[in-house]
Image (cartoon, helix red, strand yellow):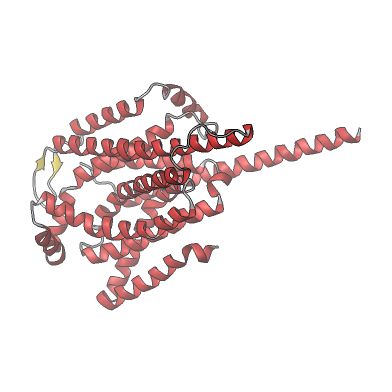
């Protein structure tokens, strides 16, 4: 199963490193390899989050996520998106923006990095909403019960997550968004209005894409419940509504869009962080693309192995990591944070949630064995 799931990732890694060696020599090969590791370390929590959503989709859409989705992730977010940012921020035409990316690496880096406040605000608010909606929801399984129980009670207030997100955005706009250092030059600049607009854009995007996918998912679940009820009562439906297949298709499509936006939000820090290693657009796209492929394969692996069902706190750890990443993105509007710290935060939180899950499973197994022994003793008596 491991080879079946990661086969394409292994093949693309071999082909990508070979291509890097041919085009840029041993130095280029090393750069591409480092970028791949950077992307994997920064986006490991992304795989866990994606798996929680992808397991609701059928095998067809899982394949779409691994094929069409990876094309969007590699060519869209790692190659096209930075060029689009350059075109918008520098007010260049598409062709001229491509020329800058290919021919003037220093200016390309300056333009993309200069757009970081807007990118960080958009991605940070989108990720923050994912975290807030998770932490304010009342769940049967709680990891940090001392924290999650009171937050779940507060979550009964509708739109609380939106209010909290807007408060965080206002704080960011009036603190870290003022006096932002100019990249590649001297002095500072006020990015408050840019951060506010981009942050609201991230919030609206989350509400639209997440809301639509949730709507169709709820419709699908309702239809399935109605069908089950009709089968139990052995009754004829009064009216034929939209087909379950159609609803599943719509729900899966919008979930797919939701996954792509999540991937985009996670990729922002990777694209910006890659400039610390190289400003060659093609090296960046190749290295980050290889890393993105492993994240996609890992997502599918987690789904097919049922890992999230076996280790129930993993989703909690991943969402806490998302909350931390959202805060880090907002802080990086003004202050530089090393990518090692960003990656370690996610790895540590997911690692702790995994260990907590193992402890929980062993405790439940021991309790089950104890109950079984008592039952045997009672029956013997």
Q: Position of residue 136 (x, y in %)?
A: 42, 29
Residue found at x 26% / y 62%: 284
Quadrant of the image containing the N terminus: bottom right
Residue found at x 48% / y 28%: 138
- Is residue 35 at all visible to an observer of this figure? no
Among all residues in the image, which is located at the extreme bottom? Answer: 22
Image quadrant assignment for residue 99: bottom left
Q: Nearer the viewer, residue 14 or 358?
A: 14
Q: Nearer the viewer, residue 335 or 374?
A: 374
Q: Nearer the viewer, residue 22 or 5?
A: 5
Residue found at x 43% / y 32%: 135
Q: Nearer the viewer, residue 55 or 279?
A: 55
Q: Position of residue 28 (x, y in %)?
A: 28, 71
Q: Position of residue 346 (x, y in %)?
A: 41, 46
- Is residue 326 at all visible to an observer of this figure? yes
Quadrant of the image containing the C terminus: top right
Q: Position of residue 353 (x, y in %)?
A: 51, 42
How many marks are shown on the rendered structure?
A: 0
Image quadrant assignment for residue 167: top left
Asked if residue 366 is positioned above or below residue 301 in the image, the reply reads: above
The answer to whether 279 appears left or right of 292 in the picture is left
Residue found at x 31% / y 51%: 267
């Amino acid at each position: 199963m491991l080879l079946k799931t990661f086969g394409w990732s292994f093949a693309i890694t071999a082909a990508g490193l070979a291509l890097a060696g041919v085009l840029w020599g041993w130095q280029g090969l090393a750069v591409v390899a480092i970028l791949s590791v950077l992307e994997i370390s920064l986006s490991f929590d992304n795989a866990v989050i994606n798996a929680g959503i992808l397991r609701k989709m059928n095998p067809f859409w899982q394949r779409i996520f691994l094929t069409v989705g990876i094309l969007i992730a590699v060519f869209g977010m790692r190659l096209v998106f930075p060029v689009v940012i350059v075109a918008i921020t520098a007010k260049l035409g598409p062709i001229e923006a491509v020329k800058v990316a290919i021919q003037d690496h220093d200016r390309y880096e300056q333009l993309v990095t200069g757009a970081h406040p807007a990118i960080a605000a958009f991605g940070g608010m989108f990720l923050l909403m994912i975290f807030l909606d998770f932490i304010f929801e009342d769940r049967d399984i709680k990891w940090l019960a001392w924290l999650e129980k009171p937050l779940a009670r507060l979550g009964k207030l509708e739109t609380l997550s939106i209010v909290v997100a807007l408060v965080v955005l206002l704080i960011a706009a009036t603190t870290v968004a003022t006096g932002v250092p100019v990249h590649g030059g001297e002095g500072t600049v006020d990015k408050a209005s840019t951060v506010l607009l981009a942050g609201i854009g991230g919030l609206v995007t989350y509400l639209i894409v997440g809301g639509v996918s949730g709507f169709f998912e709820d419709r699908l679940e309702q239809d399935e419940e109605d069908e089950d009820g009709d089968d139990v009562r052995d009754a004829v439906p009064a009216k034929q509504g939209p087909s379950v297949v159609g609803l599943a298709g719509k729900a899966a499509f919008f979930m797919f869009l939701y996954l792509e936006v999540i991937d985009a939000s996670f990729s922002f820090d990777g694209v910006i962080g890659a400039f610390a290693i190289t400003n060659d657009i093609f090296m960046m796209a190749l290295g980050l693309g290889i890393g993105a492929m492993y994240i996609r394969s890992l997502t599918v692996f987690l789904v097919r192995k049922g890992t999230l069902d076996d280790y129930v706190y993993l989703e909690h750890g991943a969402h806490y990591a998302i909350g931390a990443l959202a805060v880090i993105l907002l802080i990086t509007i003004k202050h530089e944070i090393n990518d090692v710290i960003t990656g370690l935060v996610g790895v540590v939180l997911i690692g702790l949630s995994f260990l907590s899950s193992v402890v929980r499973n062993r405790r439940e197994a021991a309790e089950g064995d104890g109950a079984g022994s008592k039952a045997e003793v009672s029956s013997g008596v």
